[in-house]
Amino acid sequence: MSTAREQPIFSTRAHVFQIDPATKRNWIPAGKHALTVSYFYDATRNVYRIISIGGAKAIINSTVTPNMTFTKTSQKFGQWADSRANTVYGLGFASEQHLTQFAEKFQEVKEAARLAREKSQDGVELTSPALGLMAHQVPPTPLVSANGPGEEKLFRSQSADTPGPTERERERSVGEVQWEAEFFALQDSNNKLADALREANAAATQWRQQVEAQRAEAERLRQRVAELEAQVAAEPAPATEKEAPGQPLEKLEALVRTKDQEIQTLKNQTGGPREAPDAADREETEQKVQDLEARNTELENQLRATERSLEEARAERERARAEVGL
């Protein structure tokens, strides 16, 4: 079988069954999973077919004829008889909507096949009004049916010697295949849930690893903060102006102010109206002023350096605490 010259018209997913050829009563599933079932139009032969491929073989290869009937036996199951293949096909759908769509398309294809048959008998080339597909003049294939017109007796064999099932047996067979279709649908859902569960477990494992890594990093930062605090607490009180944060800063500022006052006093003394100071005293006084100004500048530089060191230590401590807080 080849569908290279055929064009797909409609496709859906369904669990495929065939009637048991021995008993003509029980359904045989084509597989455990839903298969793609499609309508195809063969423009060369002007025929419509229902095809479903399972693996490397055709599970369904049914040519739609005007006498075929698609019957809904439940909200999710439908069937039709193919006298040429001497079998009955059943389809179990995931929802009633999918079943309704397939049944409506079956009616369209059946009507198109009827018009194609009538036009081909008249020898006229036509366009199918039901599906809008071009058809060619091909003599119709003789229809063989042991069930009579309509092929409505879906569970009868072509052999006249084989008795058909009773109504109760038919209802039981339909009930069994419905349960099988539901069972296979549940299996598909279970497989999907199992895959989703495996993905969720993998994601949870990855999340736990990330949490552990963050906890380890937080513990490391806590230890670092503790070390910094211990180091600050263990540092001896500064003996000189350079080492003093806190209280020593105040001492430096007081010393600077004192020196400023001394400089101002000396300036006043040198600039005041002294009567004929000797050159030696003036020179000595100016030297003292210069020394004091140099000392004052040095103290101011030390004060600024100490303030910068203190600010840097405070910033480092705040950053470490912020990291631990994360």
Image: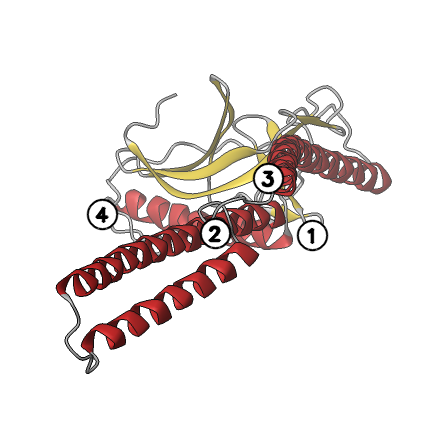
* Disc 4/disc 2 C-alpha distance (Å): 103 Å
Which mark sits nearer the N-terminus, 1 or 2? 1
Residue at which label 2 appears:
310
Tell me what residue is drawn at x 59 percent, y 26 percent.
Answer: 86
| The image quarter in which residue 204 lies | top right
Q: Secondary structure at mark 4?
A: loop
Q: Nearer the viewer, residue 260 or 15?
A: 260
The amino acid sitting under disc 4 is Val
The amino acid sitting under disc 3 is Leu
Residue at which label 4 appears:
124
Q: Mark 1 or 3, which is nearer the eye? A: 3
Q: Is residue 321 visible?
A: yes
Q: On the rendered structure, is 111 left or right of 187?
A: left
* Disc 4/disc 3 C-alpha distance (Å): 99 Å
Residue at which label 1 appears:
75
Q: Mark 4 or 3, which is nearer the eye? A: 3
| The image quarter in which residue 220 lies | top right
Which mark sits nearer the N-terminus, 2 or 3? 3
